[in-house]
Structure formats: C-alpha cells, structure tokens
Image (tube, rainbow, N blue to C red):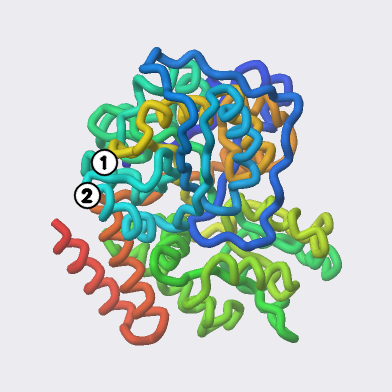
Amino acid sequence: MSQRKLTRRDFLKFAGTSLAAASATGLLASCGPQATPTPAAAKATPVASVAPTQPAAKPTAAPAKGKTLVVAIQAFAHDAMKPVLAGWEAKTGNKVTLESGPATGQEMMTKYAPPFQSGTSPVDVLSVDDVSGPAFARAGWLMPLDEIIPQETWKDFPEGMLPSVDKDYFHSYNGKRYRVPHEFAVGYFWYRKDWFEEKKVSVPKTWEEFVTVGKAFTKDGVWGTTEGMKKPGLTFVYLAYLAAQTGGDIFKFDDATAKAFQFAYDLIYTHKIMPETVLAEDYTQQNDRYMKDTVAMMRQWPYFWDVARGNTAWYKEGRADIALPPAGPAGPKTWYGGWGWSVPKAAPNAEEAKDLIAWITSNANAPTLAKGQSWFVMPRKSILDAMGNTGLPVYMNQYTKAGCLVPRPYHPKQSDAETVVDDIGQLYLTKQMSLADAMKAGRERIAALG
C-alpha cells in the first residue's frame, strides 16, 4: 500500500459545503469488525428521508426477471441491508437472499477460494476485506467494477480512498477497481466515561498513563483493558495497532515492532491489566467482557458503536465513549482498513449482480445503510450530508485532525504475512519464545515468502 496518509485536506476538499456548514466537525465516518461481532448488534433503522433511487450506471444487458441472487455479508449487517434490497427487488422483480459471510480474511479465503478456483461461485455479490479482496483480484476471480459503478458513485468518495494504481492494494489492482468500499475501519479507543468521572480519573494520553489508569481499575473482577487476539487474524490486528504507535514496520520485525510486542506482553504479565485469556478470545468475547462491566478501556472497531447501543438493557450514556488512543513512542496512532463490495467473475447471475451492486453502492442508498448500521458509515459526501455533525463522524474527525490515522500494514502476500505475525505473536505472548528469537524468526519467515 502507498504510505501516503489519508489527510484532513483530502476530506475537506472532498466534503465541500456540507462540512463547512458543520464547522468541519462531521468530517469522517466509521467502520466495523474484522472478526465475529456480538449478537447484540443494533437492528437496522429504515431511513424514510432517503428514498432509494437507481444510479445512472453505464448501460448493461437488461437483467432477467424473477431470479434469486445471493449476497454474502456478515450477519450483523443483514437488517441494515433489507430496506435497500427491498427497493431493488421491487424495481426488478428479482429476489435477494442474504448469506452470513466470514468475519476474517483468512476465513474468507478458506470458504471462497476453492469454488472460485474451480470456476464457480456460491454468491453473486460479496463483501471482502483487505486480505481476501486483493488476493481474489490478483487471482482473476473478481470482476473489475470501473465500468459497472457509475462515476457519480466513485466521485462520492474522497480521492485518497480510491487509489488507481496497482501498488495501492486497498481497493484496486492493475489499474482497475475490484471493490467498492462500504467500511472505513479505524481501531477506536473506547472507555467507560462514567467510571472515569466517578473516580475522577483522566483519560490516558500516553502508554505510561494507560498502564497507571489500567492498574487503578484492575480489581474485583474488573480489568483495565482487554482485546480479542484469537487466531487467525486477530493477533495481527492488535500487534499492528501497537506497532503503529511505536512507528514499527510490523512485517520487518524491526526494533520498533519489538517494542510493540513487548508492550503487549507487559500488559498481560508485567502490569497484569489485561487477562491472559485474550489470546484465545474473539471480538464477541471481548465485547461481552466490556458490556458485562468488567473492562474499563479497549481498542475496538467502529461497529461497537451500534453493538453497545443495541444492548438496550445495558447501554447508558457514558458507558461506551471514544477518546484518542494513548500515545506510544510514535504518537497516538491507529491503522485503518476496511471491507468492500465485489462481484465474483463466476457469479451465477452476473448481469443481475452488476445491477444490484450499482444499486447497493449508489449515492442514494449509501446513507440508508450508514444510518442502519455503523459498519456502513463512510467518508462519502452523501453519507456526511445525511448524518451531519452526529455520531461516529464526530470522532473520525477528531482522529483525523489529531493525525492518528495510518494505513494498514501492507505486504504483497498479505494473508501469508499476517499469518506470520499471528504465529510469532502467539508464540511470544504465550512464553514459548523470547522476544529476540521472535523477531529473528519473524524476519526469517517473512523473507521466505519472497
């Protein structure tokens, strides 16, 4: 991935008058999970003020009537999809079945690579992540979308989000685009504002303060912090988050990366403010800990906004607030990535799938999705116009102005490289390998990837 940061200028240039009217406070948007979400995810809320309209896509063959298409996306997003899909069904006479898509890139590849490789596809439209999307595109298994998605949709995104050269893997390859982003994933720092106010404790601004505050809360069954670090994929997510704060290049296993590994180890074993069991837990378990009032602070994706508020028996103002991440040696950093819509080349209903993806991603329907589930909140003009200075855009703006956002670490063999981090991180964090040996083994295994 290009190391050019997604700057505030990108967003201000893109967002125009709607943000100026909001004093640029509603600048950006938010994102969602890279792993299994909690069942407490909020229900979609239809948005009556946003009437779905078909975008003026480049003409394609007229879709046949009466077909049933399969759309695969994580189950927690299904309710938000239904109002948009209903509009397309009414327009075309076709039907859409929602399938629960995998929650990590590795699981995506395990499930879909075999049928794609055989020239078939069980789905017509697919939500893919930063690992599986580029891998599928490079293998020739996805349709290029440049001619399918109208320019008015592409222009709805800030320029910095849609690179057009193949070195930028986020949503394109070989000069063509194979994904339309539906998420802008940022690892936010969540905390119990109500507890902090009760104890008259300030939000930690540095790693040192994070440890001090964590120790103050760690007692009587409560932990200072937690995380989901289960393999595959989630160990990488957290270690990459810490490496962003040390300035490390995690796939080089450099000295700054070693500091990130050491800090994670210290949180568990030295400072004892994070439970050792996080190494075998996913995001459902992480969120469950938090919403059972046993965690004071955590890093989590933007989808937790709706997860927390959807748990109506638990949620109250102040129980799931967002602050800037505590600063490590390189500052208060967090990396961004995301999921996006794609169409498999072997889609059973290819022409209808083209029409459907243009509909789902249109400027008229994007705000409906965003208001139905925070995972769909994006820094698109249509969404920012609809949401204004409310909700997650406020915090994305804060993170952008503070210079917190850095790109997801990139390797040409992304899935394999992330697996190396997963494996080495787990060996080190379960005390099966020294830090020096972990860095050496990591460098050797990355080099072996070629």
Q: Residue at x 64, y 44 (%)?
A: 374
State yes or no: discs 1 and 2 in contact (Cβ < 8 Å).
yes
Q: Position of residue 355 (x, y in %)?
A: 45, 25
Q: Quadrant of residue 369?
A: top right
Q: Is residue 164 left or right of residue 86?
A: left
421 versus 69 height, above or below: below
Q: Horizontally, is 389 left or right of 413 in the view?
A: right
Residue closer to the observer: 255 or 244: 244
Q: Residue furthest front?
A: 66
Q: CA distance from mark 1 to mark 2?
A: 8 Å
Reply above or below: 172 against 422: above
Residue 85, image x, y percentages? 58, 34
Residue 2 in sight: no
Quadrant for the C terminus, please: bottom left
Q: Residues within 10 Å of mark 2 (few under 14, many from 20)?
A: some
Measured from the top left, where is residue 350 in percent x and y? 35, 31
Name the residue that disc number 2 marks: 117
Residue at 37% in and 73% down: 425
Q: Which mark is residue 371?
A: none
Q: What secondary structure is found at the residue carrying circle 2? A: helix
- Going by the numbered disc 1, the residue's amino acid type is Trp
> Residue tagged by mark 1?
141
Vertical order, 100 against 79 (above or below) = below
Q: Amino acid at mark 2?
A: Gln
Residue 230, image x, y percentages: 46, 72
Residue 238 vertical placement versus 277 (above, below): above
Helix, strand or loop at label 1? It is loop
Q: What residue is at 69 percent from the left and 80 percent from the top?
A: 218
Q: Earlier in the sequence, mark 1 or mark 2?
A: 2
Res 347 visible: yes
